Structures are given as C-alpha cells and as structure tokens.
C-alpha cells in the first residue's frame, strides 16, 4: 500500500541520514545524547538545567545548576539560578541543600524577598522538632 511505501521511504531517509553523519565523522543523534547536559559552563548549561527542572527532572537539573553556579556565581542570572536550584533540592527531598542556597540568596537584594518566602515555606513544610 501507499502508506507502507511511505513508511519504508521514511526509514530509508533515516538510514541515509545516519550513514551520511557517520561518513562525515559525526554520530547520528541519539535520545541519550539529547538528554545529556551540554559540555560547557556557559548559558547553554543553565538553559538545560532550567528545561530539566521545568519538566520535573530536578534530580538531573541539580548537578547542572551547581556546575553553572560554581563557574558563573557573579553572573546577573546567578541569584535566580540559586532560587531555582533551591527549589529543585526541595523537590528531591534535600531541604538542607535548599536552605544553603536560600540563605545565600537572602544576601542578594534582587532576590532576598523571594528567598525569604521560600525559606518560610521550607520551614512550614519541615516536620516538627521532637520533644525530649
């Protein structure tokens, strides 16, 4: 049938693209490679971390945020990245790391109010301290 021929043609095109990439010395794109963080400490890494966080993959985003913040702590986006990594740490169940980033963000005027609110929410979500 026509749709079967079209499907076969699509497969042939995909094979040709893969073969062309191999001949050119490149590799065919793979899903795993597309999901890997960029090998950089620049804005593509921060963009990747943000996309992962927004899609609910905070466990993958955290190391990328950490790497970006270590290299770009003075960048104008850093205060917001601090809030974002704190949110991810909270989402993955690491309130101590979330608190560390929020307390650092408290010292930055542009995000101090947001950091304060996030710390209050973190404290409200914490289990009550045990009595002796």
Image (spheres, grey):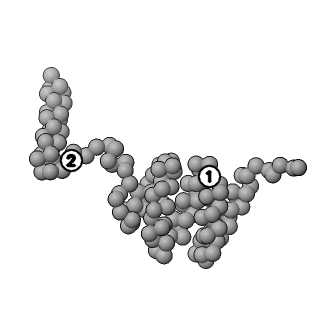
Q: Where is residue 104 in the image (x, y as percent from the top left)?
A: 61, 70
Element on which disc 2 rests: loop
Element on which disc 1 rests: loop
- Relative to 111, is 39 on the left or the right? left
Q: Where is residue 40 in the image (x, y as percent from the top left)?
A: 35, 63
- Mark 1: give few (<14), some (14-19) or many (20+) Cα within 10 Å: few
User: Which residue is pictured at 58% across the width and 59% down the height?
Assistant: 86
User: Which residue is pictured at 45% across the width and 58% down the height?
Assistant: 64
Residue underneath mark 2: 27
- Relative to 129, is 56 on the left or the right? left
For marks 2 and 1, give the CA distance: 37 Å
Q: Which of 3 and 7 is in front in this view?
A: 7
Q: Can residue 11 be seen in this view?
A: yes
Residue 112, placed above or below residue 31 = below
User: Which residue is pictured at 54% across the width and 59% down the height?
Assistant: 85
Q: Which of marks 2 and 1 is nearer the N terminus?
A: 2
Q: How many marks?
A: 2
- Relative to 17, is 98 on the left or the right? right
User: Which residue is pictured at 15% across the width and 29% down the height?
Assistant: 8
Q: Where is residue 60 in the image (x, y as percent from the top left)?
A: 47, 50
Residue 15, placed above or below residue 70 = above
């Amino acid at each position: 049938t026509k749709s079967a021929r079209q499907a076969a043609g699509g497969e042939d095109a995909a094979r040709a693209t893969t073969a062309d990439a191999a001949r050119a010395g490149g590799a065919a794109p793979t899903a795993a490679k597309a999901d890997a963080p960029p090998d950089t400490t620049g804005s593509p890494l921060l963009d990747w971390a943000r996309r992962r966080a927004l899609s609910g993959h905070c466990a993958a985003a955290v190391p990328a945020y950490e790497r970006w913040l270590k290299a770009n702590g003075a960048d104008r986006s850093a205060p917001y990245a601090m809030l974002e990594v704190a949110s991810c740490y909270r989402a993955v169940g690491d309130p101590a790391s979330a608190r560390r980033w929020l307390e650092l963000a408290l010292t930055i005027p542009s995000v101090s109010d947001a950091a304060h609110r996030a710390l209050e929410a973190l404290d409200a979500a914490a289990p009550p301290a045990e009595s002796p």
